Image (cartoon, rainbow, N blue to C red):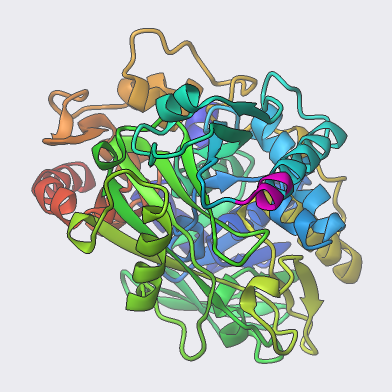
Amino acid sequence: MTSDQSAKLDARLRRRHLEELSDRSDVDVLVVGGGVTGVGIALDAATRGLRTVLVDAHDLAFGTSRWSSKLVHGGLRYLASGRLGVAHESAVERGILMTRTAPHLIHAMTQVVPLMPSITLSHRLLVRTGFIAGDTLRAVARTPGSVLPRSRKVNAARTIELVPGVRTDGLKGGLLAFDGQLVDDARLVVTIARTAAEHGASILNHVRADEVTGSSARLTDTTTGETFTLAAKAVINATGVWAAEVDSSIKLRPSRGTHLVFDAELFGNPTGALTVPVPGSISRFIFALPQQQGRIYLGLTDEDAPGPIPDEPQAADSEIDFLLDTVNTALQVPVTRNDIRGTYSGLRPLLDSGGGETSDVSRKHAVLESPNGLITIVGGKLTTYRRMAQDAVDKAVEVRGLQASECKTHNLPLIGAPAHAASTATDGLPDSLVARYGGAARTVLDAATVAMPLEPIADGVDVTRAEIEFAITNEGAVDASDVLDRRTRIGLVAGDADRARPAVQEILDAVST
C-alpha cells in the first residue's frame, strides 16, 4: 500500500472500518475526540505499534481546535506570569512544529507593537523585556534564528510598512517579535489525522461514543444509526470542553476566546500582526492577524463561560466592544461593527482550580484516570498538542500494560512536510494550494477528477475545486459543512459560504455516488 493510499480518509474506507470493528477484539487504544489532541494521540499510539481507533461524534476539528488564533506560540505570556514550565514546554513544541513536524503549515509571523504616545516608557520597557525573554525561550528550545528571528526595535517608517493602518500621530516606531502562525488550525488537525491513518489508525468522524468506560464504549454511526460496542485495552477521553460529559469525575472551568473577522484592506493589507497591549495588563495583548483569503482575525478575549457547552459558542456583545475599542486605540481609521465580516468563539478546556480570572487559570495540561479506568486529558493548548498526546499514551501504556515502543512523534514529519517521504516538488502550483498542503499539493491536483480543478470554488475565494474534491475523497468530509467549515474555512464568512455552497454540494454529490 502506498503512502497516499494508506493516508486516505473516504466514505468507503469509513464503512469498511466500521464493519470490521464491530467484530474485532484486538483494539489497543480507543480515542474519543477528533480535535488536535485526539488526533495527536491517535498518531502517537499508532506510531508506537498500537492498534488505534479514533471516533468523534461530529467531525475532525469540530470543537475548540478550529476556533484558535491560528498561532503556534512560545509561551511568552506564561513567562510573564511566572509559569516557567508551561512557557518552556510551549517554546520546545513550537520549535518541533516549525522545524520537523509541520514547517509547511507554519511560518514566522511578525508581531508589531506600535510605540504610540499612550504607551508609557515603563510599559515599553516591560514589553521589550518580555520580548527579550521570548528570545531566550527560543534559544533554550534550540529553534534556529533562521526560523524565528530575534526581537528588535524599528523606526516609524518600518512600522507603517508592516501595519499600514496604524495610527501615525506621535508614532515613535515599533517593537517587533516573531512567533509561529498556522495557515489554519483545522488544516493541521486534518493533516495529523491523515498521518495517523497512514500509520494504521482508524479515523472515524460522525461516530458517537456513549457509555464510555476504561475498556469499552458504545459506538453509533450517526449517518446510519447503526450501533455496536467496541472493547479496547485503553480508552482515552480527548473531548476537550466536553470531557466532563464523558467523565463526570472531571470538573472544568471553560473560558471563551472570541475573534472578529475583517477584510484585510481595512487595515491596509498588513504583513505583520498589529499587537496592542490590553489597558491595565502587562501580559495581555490583542492581535490583528493577517490570514489567508485576504482576511484579518482580530482577537482575543478570555471570559468565563459557565453553563452547557454549545456546539458553536457565540461572541458576547461585550467581547465585540472590547476588541473594537482596544484595536481602535492603534488604528488611523477606526473599524466598526458594520465592518465585521464574521465572528467565531472557542472554549478552552481549563481545569477548575477555584476562583480568580480565567486568564489566570493554568494552561498546563493534566492526564487523569477515573475510577472506571477511563484516561482523560484536559487543559493545554494547540501548540503543545504533541506533548499532551505523548503524555496521554504514556499513561495508557503504563496503567494498561500495553506493549508499545517509545514515542516517535518529536521527529515525525506530517504529510506534506518537506521531510515526508511522499512530498514532491510544488513548482507551478498556486501559492494558496501550497500553503495549505505543502509537499502534498501535487497529490491534491493529481487526484482531481472534477472539471477545471484549479478554478476557485467561488468568486473571491481562493480555494480550488480540486481541494473540495480532495476534502471528500481523501480527508473524510461527509457533508457540505465538513467541507466549508473545517476542511476549508470558507464558512467563517457567511457570504463566502453562500456563494460556494452550490458548487461544493455539486462536487459532493458527484464524487459520493
Q: Which residue is rendered at x = 76% and y = 46% of the image?
A: 49
Relative depth, front residue between 115 and 316 = 115
Percent x, y of residue 144 = 76, 23
Task: Tell me if residue 41 comes above or below residue 440 in the rendering.
Answer: below
Q: Nearer the viewer, residue 97 or 82?
A: 82
Q: Position of residue 401 (x, y in %)?
A: 90, 65
Quadrant including the N terminus: top right
The correct choice, above or below, for 287 with respect to 81 in the image is above
Left or right relative to 489: residue 392: right
Relative to the observer, which residue lies in front, 350 or 151?
A: 151
In this picture, residue 89 sits left or right of residue 471: right
Residue sitting at x 16%, y 42%: 507
Q: Image quadrant of residue 329?
A: bottom left
Residue at position x 10%, y 47% in the image: 499
Total numbered circles: 0
- Vertical position of residue 173 compared to residue 42: above or below: above
* Location of residue 273 in the rendering, given as x and y in whole percent from the top left corner: 47, 39
Residue 216 is left or right of residue 370, and the answer is left
Q: Which residues are magenta?
A: 120-125
